[in-house]
Image (tube, rainbow, N blue to C red):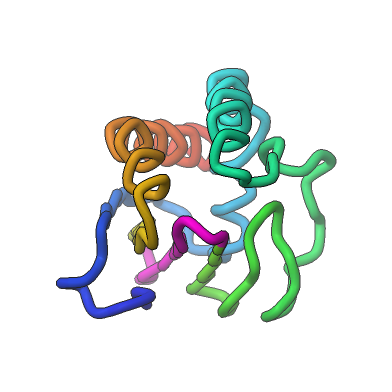
């Protein structure tokens, strides 16, 4: 679900985990991943301050209260546009004049477990997009890994 051919992407990262629960949807997993987290809120505040220099509007983090009903394609989920949503797939996109980010939550289910893949793609459009992605690329994988650990802890 990349935004451009892989050789033209500027950033791509995938985190995976396995949970022993097959009842959750991709939307449910996203909600668990994005529950209130002080470190993540701090990261969003830093992002909003730094992004002002590039003329990007603040996003403020994930919306509170968390939505109870899954959105439809072309609706908003937090600061993302919903591109595709089904029981086992959630594809979100955010675009500004500097870059486009696509985030996919993909589930592969068996009778006993669910494999979760969280894939992020970024396409930069200008120098600010490249500069913005330097610290983000260093932190993003670690942040998503922590989010998936939260999922594993909560669904035990």
What x and y, as percent, mark residue 16? 29, 51
Query: Which quarter of the picture shows residue 5?
Result: bottom left
User: Is 11 on the left-hand or right-hand side of 26?
Assistant: left
* Residue 62 can be seen in this image: yes
33 in magenta: no
From this viewpoint, which residue is outermost toward the left? 7
Residue 18 sits above or below residue 105 on the image: above
Number of labelled discs? 0
Instruction: Identify the residue at horizontal 39%, vertical 70% (top origin).
Output: 109
User: Is 55 on the left-hand or right-hand side of 20?
Assistant: right
Of 125 and 73, the residue lying toward us: 125
* Residue 113 can be seen in this image: no
Instruction: Identify the residue at horizontal 53%, vertical 26% (top origin).
Output: 43
User: Is 60 on the left-hand or right-hand side of 41?
Assistant: right
Query: Which quarter of the picture shows residue 118?
Result: bottom left
Query: Which quarter of the picture shows residue 47?
Result: top right
108 in magenta: yes
User: Is 145 on the left-hand or right-hand side of 36?
Assistant: left
- Magenta span of residues: 96-113
Of 41 and 147, the residue lying toward us: 41
Give the main secondary structure, helix, strand or loop, of the magenta stretch.
strand
Image quadrant in which the N terminus is located = bottom left
What x and y, as percent, mark residue 123? 35, 63
What x and y, as percent, mark residue 144? 40, 40
Instruction: Identify the residue at horizontal 41%, vertical 67% (top origin).
Output: 107
What x and y, as percent, mark residue 150? 49, 33
Of 124 and 86, the residue lying toward us: 124
């Amino acid at each position: 679900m990349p935004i451009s051919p892989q050789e033209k992407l500027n950033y791509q990262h995938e985190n995976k985990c396995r949970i022993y629960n097959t009842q959750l949807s991709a939307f449910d997993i996203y909600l668990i991943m994005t529950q209130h987290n002080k470190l993540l809120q701090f990261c969003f505040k830093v992002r909003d301050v730094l992004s002002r220099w590039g003329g990007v509007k603040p996003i403020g983090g994930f919306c509170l209260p968390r939505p109870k009903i899954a959105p439809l394609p072309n609706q908003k989920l937090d600061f993302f546009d919903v591109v595709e949503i089904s029981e086992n797939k959630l594809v979100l996109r955010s675009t500004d004049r500097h870059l486009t980010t696509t985030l996919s939550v993909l589930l592969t289910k068996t009778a006993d477990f669910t494999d979760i893949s969280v894939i992020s793609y970024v396409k930069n459009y200008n120098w600010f997009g490249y500069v913005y992605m330097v610290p983000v690329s260093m932190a993003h994988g670690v942040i998503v890994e922590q989010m998936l650990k939260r999922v594993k802890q909560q669904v035990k």
